């Protein structure tokens, strides 16, 4: 059996679920999801509290692991605990739980050969599930907006997006500006990055219209005030935030932040003429090189923090 921990926000949950679907091809009856990270006792200690948002999709199929199945992987027996105490007294580091596989780099090809492991990670790399993206597009069935009037507004916008040279632009601010996060995630999706990505479309298409998606609406209104060129999408909030991903799916182009939320706005886009742009790096503490990134993200245009296409 394999158990995948579901954790983090919507984009991360979708990636973990995508890996779940991929691993089912190797273990048709032996993959489970662990949702215990969302238990109230766990979440009360989290700085940024999260909810299990995969449940918002219509009829998304999955099998949840039982507590005893999770415990079989995570509860270390008395002998292991005693060994750990001895090693600690000797000043040696206790070995990690051998039942747990934890992501430590962008792509782990060995994950497809695992068995009897509890799997932890975010698995953002496109290469993990690129070949089943068609299946995922069908599985991630978006609900209607909770407000009928806003559902109507979204449907009207989708129709408009599909008839024009529309480009979604996702700008992640909020928690990314916190000092501890900025060190890791900041100065990647820079102004230069966005200017270069927008210019990419303006140089190739006529009458491009940009749709701005961000939780910082005040920032958006300050920087993208020209309504003839920009539309700020600011009405999909709270549990309806996934409607933004739904809208991004219908644009000709997708300009992503270094954010899994906007990655899915591009990934689930089924337009045959779509163009996907993402940041060259995801994190400042993650080494990258052009050949590897183009292998891991086939079909994507990569632009670095200076605005240079890589």
Image (tube, grey):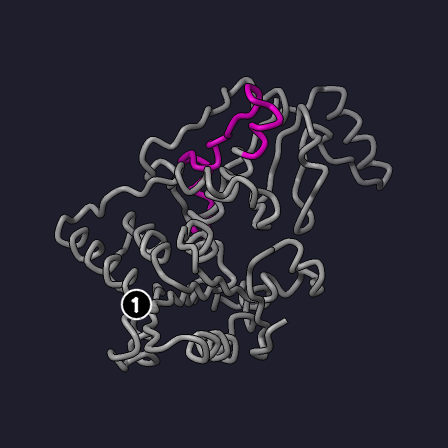
Measured as percent of width and height from the top left, residue 143 is found at 27, 42
The residue lying at 46 percent from left, 32 percent from top is 35
Which of the pair 199/174 is nearer the observer?
199
Based on the picture, tell me whether residue 44 belongs to the magenta stretch: yes
Measured as percent of width and height from the top left, residue 309 is found at 59, 74
Judged from this view, the residue extending furthest toward the right is 90
The residue lying at 23 percent from left, 58 percent from top is 159
Q: Where does the C terminus fall, quadrant-wise?
A: bottom right
Whether residue 156 sits left or right of residue 307 in the image: it is left
User: In the rendered view, would you say 103 is above or below 204?
Assistant: above
- The magenta stretch spans which residues? 22-48
Measured as percent of width and height from the top left, residue 225 is found at 28, 81
User: In the rendered view, would you say 105 is above or below 279?
Assistant: above
Hey, which quadrant is residue 303 in on the image?
Answer: bottom right
Based on the picture, tell me whether residue 199 belongs to the magenta stretch: no
Hey, which quadrant is residue 292 in on the image?
Answer: bottom right
User: In the rendered view, would you say 285 is above or below 220?
Assistant: above
Whether residue 28 sits left or right of residue 104 in the image: it is left
Mark 1 residue element: loop
Measured as percent of width and height from the top left, residue 109 is found at 70, 41
The residue lying at 54 percent from left, 63 percent from top is 181
Q: Which residue is mark 1?
A: 164
How many neighbours does mark 1 have within 10 angstroms: few (below 14), some (14-19), or many (20 or more)?
Answer: some
Q: Where does the N terminus fall, quadrant-wise?
A: top right
Judged from this view, the residue extending furthest toward the left is 149
């Amino acid at each position: 059996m394999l158990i995948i921990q579901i954790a983090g926000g919507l984009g991360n949950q979708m990636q973990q679920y995508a890996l779940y679907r991929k691993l089912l091809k190797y273990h048709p009856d032996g993959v489970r999801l662990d949702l215990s990270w969302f238990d109230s006792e766990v979440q009360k200690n989290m700085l940024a509290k999260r909810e299990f948002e995969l449940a918002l999709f219509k009829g998304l199929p999955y099998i949840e692991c039982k507590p005893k199945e999770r415990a079989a992987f995570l509860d270390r027996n008395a002998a292991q605990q005693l060994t750990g105490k001895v090693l600690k007294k000797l000043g040696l580091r206790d070995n990690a739980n051998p039942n747990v596989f934890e992501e430590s780099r962008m792509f782990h090809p060995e994950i497809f050969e695992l068995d009897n492991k509890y799997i932890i990670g975010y698995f953002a790399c496109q290469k993990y599930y690129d070949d089943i993206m068609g299946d995922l597009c069908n599985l991630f069935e978006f609900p209607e907006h909770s407000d009928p009037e806003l559902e109507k507004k979204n449907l009207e916008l989708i129709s408009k997006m599909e008839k024009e040279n529309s480009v979604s632009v996702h700008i992640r601010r909020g928690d990314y500006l916190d000092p501890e996060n900025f060190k890791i995630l900041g100065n990647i999706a820079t102004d230069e990055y966005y200017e270069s990505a927008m210019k990419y479309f303006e140089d190739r298409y006529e009458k491009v219209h940009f749709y701005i998606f961000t939780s910082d609406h005040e920032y958006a209104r300050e920087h993208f005030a020209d309504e003839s060129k920009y539309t700020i999408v600011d009405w999909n909030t709270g549990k309806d935030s996934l409607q933004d991903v739904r809208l991004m799916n219908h644009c000709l182009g997708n300009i992503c932040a270094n954010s899994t939320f906007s990655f899915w706005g591009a990934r689930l886009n089924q337009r045959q003429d779509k163009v996907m742009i993402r940041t060259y790096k995801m994190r400042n503490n993650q080494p990258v090189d052009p050949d590897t990134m183009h292998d891991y993200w086939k079909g994507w245009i990569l632009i670095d923090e200076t605005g240079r296409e890589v």
